[in-house]
Image: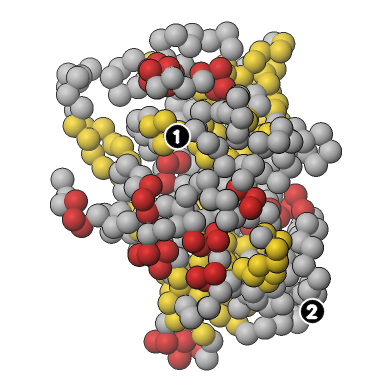
Amino acid sequence: MKNSKNILDETPFQTAGPFLHIGCMPNKIKINNLYKNDLGEVPFKIKNDIEMITVEGSVFDGNSIPLDDVMLETWQCDENGQFFEDNGFARFIPDKLTKKFKLFTVKPGQVENLDGKNQSPHICLSISSRGLNMTLNTRIYFEGDDLINDPILSMIKNNKGNIDSLVAKKIKKNFYVFDVFLQGDKETVFFDI
Amino acid sequence: MNLKSLVKRNYNKQPEIDFPDYKSSIFRAPKNKKISIPSNLEIFGPIFNKKIIGKLDNDLTLNFSKNKMSPLGHKIIVHGTVSDQFSNPIKGALIEIWQANAAGKYLHQDDKNPAPIDPNFSGCGRSLTSSDGSYEFLTIQPGPYPYPNRGIEWRPMHIHFSIFGESFGQRLITQMYFEGDPLINLCPMVNSITDKKAKKSLVGKLDTSRSSIQNILAYKFDIVLRGVKQTYFENRQEGL
């Protein structure tokens, strides 16, 4: 173990601001001749016989206004609970008109926790935007899965966190709704990871 | 057994989330305290292939120019290293940058600042760090610009940085400022960081040794991402 005195400070965050699309998804704002594709357009190369799901939702501010200038990034394992370096990452923004984002991806499997217990299927979600001095981290769990035995959700329950805010509602087969509330009674639980 | 985890984030060295001097944060900053969870899964993260990076992706003076016309303004080199908190260089880290042009205008439909667009400048670039963690961009000095906050205020000259290290938990989005800019200390976004040393770490230093090489002003900006450490975990037997 290295001496803690030698540990450097992490570079501080600053807001991503309102123009983050220029650097992170230029094709979305019609800067078309720079990059062939924006990063994270497709989280997984679609394979046959894999259960794909859609997660749709909005990000609401403290005035209950759905935002269209936020960037969402997700990171997840595949259906077998395996992480890959070149698969599992997605980056997207809400639609300008509907204010809804849509993630079409593989339903993640269970992954093993530190203590050998399984963590319920979930997707890591980060949110960056104007007005957020730091990127926020949360998770998307899924209604219908075993959410009682998940060690992370148990920790949140012990901290009196609003577990419901982390569970995507199942609307129909393979279609979930997950809204994020930055403030208010329904404020989403955000993590210090 | 030994498992990897990330060094806990020190929030005293980070900006305040709820910082009303920055007006946009008032209805966006969450009010509840973050809940701390183990980071053993966030050790993993996407790694980006160098095949995605084009030859001019880190040269903003050329990557959007028409008929070999140069963007307006003076050229600058922005360079530095990406390392973790244990001073280990991070190789293959993806750095994406975006910035205003020399007149302080972004190539973005939502930018209401009545300053001219530069047809030869997008303000968009990216690069992967080399094996020693180093990176370099050739770009144009961004201008300061007015924006509505508590009345009209001015942003100091800055470049936005988005960085992916090796772990999703190392993800960082920040801004680099320029040494000597008097607007830095007036900026509420900068001042949302109360720790003086942390604030100073966002200021790119004029690097005269590098500047003399190509008659281009150079600035050095080193980036530190969270450290990855081995943790002994005793509630589990070896080999299970």
Q: Give the percent coordinates (x, y) of residue A140.
A: 55, 25
Judge from the rendering whether residue B2 lies leftward or rightward of residue B173; answer left or right.
Answer: left
Residue A90 seen in this snapshot: no
Numbered tag placed on residue B67 in the rendering: 2
The residue wearing badge 1 is B33
**Residue situated in front as seen by the camera: B65 or B108:** B108
Question: Dot 1: few (<14), some (14–19), or many (≥20) neighbours within 10 Å?
Answer: few
Numbered tag placed on residue B216 in the rendering: none
Q: Amino acid at mark 1?
A: Lys
Q: Give the percent coordinates (x, y) of residue B132.
A: 35, 64
Q: Chain of mark 2?
A: B
Q: Amino acid at mark 2?
A: Asn
- N-term-proximal mark, 2 vs 1: 1
In the rendered image, the vertical position of residue A36 relative to residue A83, given as above or below? below
Disc number lying in front (2 or 1): 1
Judge from the rendering whether residue B169 lies leftward or rightward of residue A101; answer left or right.
Answer: left
Colour mapping used in the image = secondary structure
Task: Kindly report the distance in space between the C-alpha atoms of the residues bearing marks 2 and 1.
Answer: 53 Å
Residue A8 seen in this snapshot: yes
